[in-house]
Amino acid sequence: MTKDEADYKDSYQNVLGAMFVRGNSLFFVDLALGKNHPWIGPNYGSALAEGGDDKWHYRFNINMSYKF
């Protein structure tokens, strides 16, 4: 996300994931990478405004569900 304020750091997000299905079971696996991102990094309050540290952070998610 490019920000209008010149002093604000841009926010970035890249997500790589896959879904696996076996019978009624579904598995979602993804790796989310972000810079100045409120969900991925530690700077929740300022990530979408001025930004925080200029490092890449990540989250690894596994979601399982069962359809009946």
Image (cartoon, grey):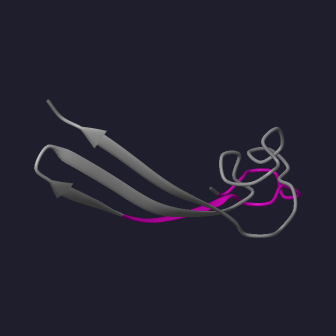
Q: Position of residue 15 (x, y in %)?
A: 48, 63
Query: Magenta stretch?
Result: 2-17
* Magenta run includes residue 7: yes
Q: Position of residue 51 (x, y in %)?
A: 83, 53
Residue 31 versus residue 64: which sits nearer the camera? 64
Q: Residue furthest left?
A: 23
Left or right? Give the position of 5 relative to 11.
right
For residue 29, above or below residue 48: below
* Magenta run includes residue 33: no
Q: Residue furthest top?
A: 68
For residue 7, above or below residue 48: below
Mostly what secondary structure, the magenta segment? loop
Residue 64 versus residue 43: which sits nearer the camera? 64
Residue at point 69%, 52% (across, down): 37
Which of the image's four quarters has the N terminus?
Answer: bottom right
Q: Position of residue 62 (x, y in %)?
A: 45, 54
Left or right? Give the position of 16 relative to 14.
left
User: Which corner quadrant of the image does residue 22 belong to?
Assistant: bottom left
Q: Position of residue 4 (x, y in %)?
A: 74, 51
Left or right? Give the position of 61 relative to 55.
left
Residue at point 72%, 53% (across, down): 3
Q: How many marks?
A: 0
Residue at point 77%, 48% (across, down): 47
Which of the image's four quarters has the C terminus?
Answer: top left
Left or right? Give the position of 56 relative to 51.
left
Residue 35 versus residue 5: which sits nearer the camera? 35
User: Which corner quadrant of the image does residue 60 belong to?
Assistant: bottom right
